[in-house]
Amino acid sequence: MKSAPFFLLGALASTVCAWSALVFVPLSSSDIGGLNSMTEQAEKDGSPQVGETRFPRMENGQHAQGALLYGSLGCNACHTQQVLPATEGADFERGFGRRGSVARDYINQDRALLGQVRVGPDLANAGLKLTDADAKKQAELLARLHLYLYNPRAVNAHSTAPAYAFLYEVVAAGTAKAPDAFEIPEGFGPHGGPWAAVPTEKARQLVRYLQFLSQDYDLPEAKRVQEKPKAHGHGEAH
């Protein structure tokens, strides 16, 4: 029994050493499980671009709220956010992205909404297809997306996506003052009409999140091919 104190001291020492190794060593060494945000300058034709930094970008509050809504609505049950490498599928040909997704793409996300099944198209680069230098064209793209979220069948008669009409306020056509209000096609609103729909703040957050999604940048471990992703209408495959 005299050896019992020494045994307990040895066990305590082993526990403290193991705990210290797990806690303090990773904090002092980026080589153990380290994956830092990119801070190198972006390159164009092999030359650094002053004032530009590599992605991934940080989400702001609107994007984070939109991501929560995206997850709560179950969008990731039918849409992925992970582009396969060129050797593992036809994602490049489908216009989903110019390179395969890698772990670093998700480093700034609280929750990576990768998804597992593609009933609809991959959305890792959805923002590229919702952004246009021409303000009028971009407004048209966003109005089409809002209409799709309101009722997918109003955009694509064969879509199997659920409708999220509860994210919109239906008003008489011509009375909506919001700049992002849109007309509801005949047969897709309440009886009577004509009608228009005004996005709620939740709908706007969801759309801003989709606009934010982009992996169209180079990383040391993942370089883009030259061709840009092909444009395709949202919801046409869902």
Image (cartoon, rainbow, N blue to C red):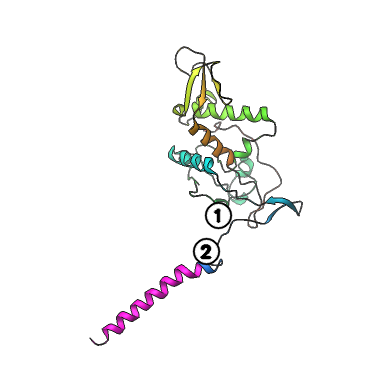
In the image, which residues are magenta?
Answer: 1-26
Q: Tag on residue 103?
A: 1
Question: Which residue, given by chain and number where applicable, does mark 2 sit on?
Answer: 33
Q: Residue at x 45, y 72 (%)?
A: 21
From the viewer's side, name the closer residue of 36 and 102: 36
Quadrant of residue 143 within the rendered picture: top right
**What is the tally of numbered marks visible in this picture?**
2
Instruction: Name the amino acid type tagged 1.
Output: Ala
Q: Tell whether position 172 is magenta.
A: no
**Other residues around mark 2 within 10 Å, as few (<14) / some (14–19) / many (≥20):** few
Q: Residue furthest top?
A: 192
Relative to 27, say whether 193 is above or below. above
Q: Residue at x 52, y 14 (%)?
A: 194
Q: Tell whether position 24 is magenta.
A: yes
Q: Tag on residue 123?
A: none
From the viewer's side, name the closer residue of 175 and 214: 175
**Other residues around mark 1 within 10 Å, as few (<14) / some (14–19) / many (≥20):** few
Quadrant of residue 213 within the rendered picture: top right
Left or right: 46 as drawn, with respect to 118: right
Instruction: Name the amino acid type tagged 2.
Output: Gly
Q: Position of residue 154 (x, y in %)?
A: 52, 23
Q: Mark 2 or mark 1: name the one nearer the start of the chain.
A: 2
Give the position of the N terminus as an image quadrant: bottom left
Q: Position of residue 118 (x, y in %)?
A: 50, 40
Q: Regarding mark 2 in the picture, which secondary structure is present there?
A: loop
Q: Between tags 2 and 1, which lies in front?
A: 2
